Amino acid sequence: MTNKEVRQWYIAQVSKIPLKDQKVEDLRNRDLKVYGNRNGPTFEFLVEKARKLGLIGDRIYAAIIEDSWVTNAEINERFED
């Protein structure tokens, strides 16, 4: 399979996964409210956020990578069952 075919297959498979409950929809609504995107922050959003903090050049990308490991305590609590 080509990369394009693999990506198309993957998207088709993921789209078959049903929403398990309201929590997923709640997360999507939160992401839309906070980031303007139901799928969470875009790369462009994260770059702009870093620039507003005064970061430049490679420091922007390093900050994005470092922050990717940080979880949101409020969201974590909502998913604890």
Image (cartoon, rainbow, N blue to C red):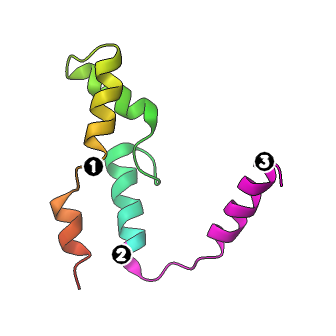
Q: Which residue is mark 2?
A: 23
Identity of the amino acid at label 2? Lys
Q: Residues within 10 Å of mark 3 (few under 14, many from 20)?
A: few
Residue 21 highlighted magenta (yes or no) = yes
Where in the figure is residue 24, as x and y percent of width and height? 41, 71
Circle 3 sits in a helix, a strand or a loop, which is it?
A: helix
Toward the front, the furthest residue is 1
Q: Which residue is mark 1?
A: 69
Mark 1–mark 2 distance (CA, rounded to whole Å)? 21 Å
**Compared to 53, does 78 lie above or below?**
below
Disc with the residue nearer the chain's start (3 vs 2): 3
**Compared to 75, does 79 lie above or below?**
below
Q: Which residue is mark 3?
A: 4
Q: Which dot marks residue 40?
A: none
* Position of residue 24 in the picture relative to residue 62 (left or right): right
Residue occupying image coordinates x 51% and y 78%: 19
Circle 1 sits in a helix, a strand or a loop, which is it?
A: loop
User: Which secondary structure is most common in the magenta stretch?
Assistant: helix
When asked about the image quadrant of residue 74, the answer is bottom left
When asked about the image quadrant of residue 54, the answer is top left
**Magenta residues, as a range?**
1-23
Mark 3–mark 2 distance (CA, rounded to whole Å)? 31 Å
- 3 and 1 marks in contact (CB < 8 Å): no
